[in-house]
Image (spheres, helix red, strand yellow):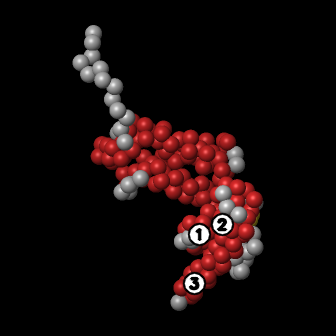
Amino acid sequence: MLRIFSKKEEPQSDAALVAHYQQTGDQVSLSQLYERYIELVYGLCLKYFKDEGLAQDAVINIYEELVKKVKAHEIKQFKSWLHVLARNHCLMQLRKKKITINFDPDLMQSVDLRHHNNDSEDVEEREEQLQGLEDCIAGLAEEQKACIELFYLQGKTYKDIASQHNMQIGKVRSFIQNGRRNLKICMERKVLKGEE
């Protein structure tokens, strides 16, 4: 029997799938949408956890978060929104394992990931510091932000960063030094505001 509508359907846009899910709660739309970016999400999770099993678990958990959060948010660009959601999920999981970014008052010459087994007050204080640091990094100029994240959070060398961004090593060094100085100023402002 011939189908009357044999014309192949065009794939729906991200925005259309988001809108359909928000209106109907139809998880088929959501799963189609997630399927488009599942490899990117897995790659991001693998970068943070350095473990395939943990990254796979995170991919499933992030989908479970999407079921609730897509309905609750106004989403203009799903891909970039999902990237932020996935990154935040990974950071939260790392924090729960008490792996935090530790830095000295001079905003360190290096940022390392260290395990802490301290009491809840110390953990809460570090949570605030980490959130403040993330906010300050987000406020940097694009080149400084990229270089700081690659150098401190991903452990890339000056040479790696220069090659990746097609710039001179001296320029990379300058962006990192200026970025670190701006982070220090930003963090000091946050401390002063907290004391007021």
Which of the 4 image quadrants contains residue 146? bottom right
Q: Residue at x 27, y 16 (%)?
A: 3
Q: Answer yes or no: do the residues labelled 2 and 3 have beta carbons within 8 Å?
A: no
State the CA–CA distance, disc 1 to disc 2: 8 Å
- Measuring from the top left, give residue 144's x and y in whole percent: 62, 69
Which residue, given by chain and number where applicable, does mark 1 sit on? 137
Residue at left offset 69%, top offset 68%: 171
Q: For residue 24, what is the image quadrant?
A: top left
Q: How many marks?
A: 3
| Callout 1 amino acid | Ile
Q: Position of residue 159 (x, y in %)?
A: 75, 59
| Front-most of residues 83 and 93 | 83
Q: Is 141 left, or right, of 8 in this rendering?
A: right
* Image quadrant occupied by the N terminus: top left
CA–CA distance in space, label 2 to label 3 = 19 Å
Query: CB of mark 1 within 8 Å of CB of mark 2?
Result: yes
Q: Dot 1: few (<14), some (14–19), or many (≥20) neighbours within 10 Å?
A: many
| N-term mark: 2 or 3 | 2
Residue type at mark 2 is: Ile
| Image position of 41 with respect to 1: above or below | below
The one of 14 and 141 positioned closer to us in this rendering: 141
Mark 2, residue position: 148
Taking the image as shown, residue 122 lies to the left or right of residue 159, namely left
Residue under the image location 69 percent in, 66 percent down: 172
The label nearer to you, 2 versus 3, is: 2
Q: Please say if 136 is above or below 156.
A: below
**Relative to 163, residue 147 above or below:** below
The span from disc 3 to disc 1 (Cα, nearest Å) is 14 Å
Q: Position of residue 31 (x, y in %)?
A: 44, 38
Secondary structure beneath label 2? helix
Mark 1 or 2 closer to N-term? 1
Q: Which residue is mark 3?
A: 189
